[in-house]
Image (tube, helix red, strand yellow):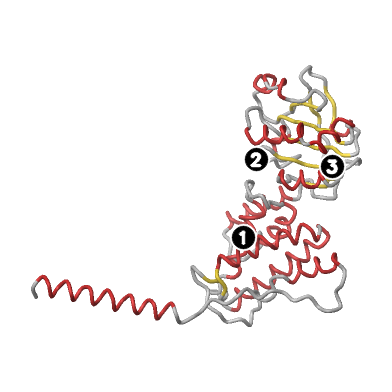
């Protein structure tokens, strides 16, 4: 076979293979996401939000569905579409409120697990495991919410497909997420100011307390400080005493912390942890800095490790 004929032969084989791939890809057309439909008897906004939160995934987690799952599809729906719907669901969950989170997560968990038990190749269950971890537990996720994640991971820790090491990992995550949950009273702790004076979190008296775990030199912390000082609504609430800011340093380099005193507003409660207990995970599970908690006048938790955008949105409309 001369060189020219050989080249033509190779090209023909490549074209034939490409044609086969195209035919294979055309065997199944991705389905639209099966959106939940509100029953006609639901009229109130809160009732609609709660129904959506609980039943949002019923279509794609129907064990009777028999559609392909692979690197591109989950039960016949494009993976990218499923992930976008998960991001949308986090907003629905936020507005529906924490009273419905256990039921909503439990319904999704049970149905996704039923899909796996019917067909281990469905990939529905493992897809939601990944999405819960990415959106709700990653400390850098703008949708993170440890309380929602708790309702997932506390069940996933007993999943029969885990190794003993994995079970221990998820049991620990569940234990940490259970600390200082929304609606409960925040754990009290001691802190010292720059002069060494000791006080407790519960000594702070205000309509709202913003518990701000920060580090000197932290760029994200500086951005939060700027907003708290410059936003007209929030800064006026701080100035009037409606909001007290407890800016707490929980690491060891006290000299570095002292050097940042000129940066921190004097009207704030600026302190450090003299007992080094806050890093022990026995009081607060501070997984990343900055970390923001919003407390009411009784020190009940309104927001826990809240993304700053969500916190500022809440305060601006308070």
**Image side of residue 1 versus residue 163, left or right:** left
**What whole-number distance in Å separates the C-alpha atoms at marks 2 and 1?**
20 Å
Q: Position of residue 53 (x, y in %)?
A: 76, 66
Would you call the spot at circle 2 few (<14 residues within 10 Å), some (14-19), or many (20 or more)? Answer: few
Q: Which mark is residue 288?
A: 2
**Image side of residue 36 versus residue 98, left or right:** left
| Secondary structure category for the residue under label 2 | loop
Quadrant for the N terminus in the image? bottom left
Residue 173 versus residue 116 in the image, above or below: above
Q: Which mark is residue 295?
A: 3
Residue most extreme to the front: 232
Q: Which mark is residue 131?
A: 1
Would you call the spot at circle 3 few (<14 residues within 10 Å), some (14-19), or many (20 or more)? Answer: many
Residue drawn at (81%, 63%), measured in percent from left and top?
100
Residue drawn at (84%, 33%), measured in percent from left and top?
238
Residue drawn at (53%, 73%), measured in percent from left and top?
69
**What whole-number distance in Å separates the C-alpha atoms at marks 3 and 2?**
19 Å
Q: Position of residue 192 (x, y in %)?
A: 79, 24
In primary-sequence order, the first of circles 3 and 2 is 2
In primary-sequence order, the first of circles 1 and 3 is 1
**What whole-number distance in Å separates the C-alpha atoms at marks 1 and 3?**
29 Å
Residue 309 versus residue 130 in the image, above or below: above
- Please tell me in which quadrant of the rendered image residue 67 appears: bottom right
Q: Position of residue 58 (x, y in %)?
A: 70, 74
| Secondary structure category for the residue under label 1 | helix
């Amino acid at each position: 076979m001369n060189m020219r004929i050989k080249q033509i032969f190779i090209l023909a084989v490549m074209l034939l293979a490409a044609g086969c791939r195209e035919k294979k890809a055309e065997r199944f057309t991705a389905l639209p996401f099966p959106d939940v439909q509100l029953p006609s008897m639901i009229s109130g906004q809160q009732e609609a939000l709660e129904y959506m939160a609980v039943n949002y995934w019923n279509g794609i987690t129907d064990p009777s569905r028999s559609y392909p799952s692979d690197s591109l599809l989950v039960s016949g729906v494009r993976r990218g579409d499923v992930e976008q719907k998960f991001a949308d669901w986090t907003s629905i969950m936020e507005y529906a409120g924490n009273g419905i989170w256990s039921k909503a997560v439990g319904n999704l968990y049970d149905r996704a697990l039923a899909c796996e038990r019917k067909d281990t190749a469905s990939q529905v269950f493992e897809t939601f495991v990944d999405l819960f971890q990415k959106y709700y537990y990653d400390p850098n996720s703008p949708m993170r919410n440890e309380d929602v994640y708790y309702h997932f991971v506390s069940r996933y820790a007993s999943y029969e497909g885990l190794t003993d090491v994995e079970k221990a990992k998820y049991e620990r995550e569940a234990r940490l997420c259970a600390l200082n949950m929304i609606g409960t009273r925040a754990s009290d702790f001691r802190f010292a100011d720059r002069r060494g004076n000791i006080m407790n979190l519960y000594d702070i008296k205000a309509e709202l307390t913003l518990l701000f775990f920060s580090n000197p030199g932290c760029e994200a912390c500086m951005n939060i400080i700027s907003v708290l000082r410059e936003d007209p609504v929030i800064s006026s609430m701080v100035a009037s005493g409606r909001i007290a800011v407890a800016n707490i340093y929980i690491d060891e380099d006290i000299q570095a912390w002292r050097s940042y005193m000129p940066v921190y507003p004097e009207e704030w409660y600026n302190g450090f942890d003299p007992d080094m207990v806050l890093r022990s995970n026995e009081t607060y599970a501070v997984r990343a800095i900055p970390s923001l908690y919003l407390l009411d006048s009784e020190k009940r938790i309104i927001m826990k490790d809240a993304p700053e955008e969500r916190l500022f949105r809440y305060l601006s409309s308070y």
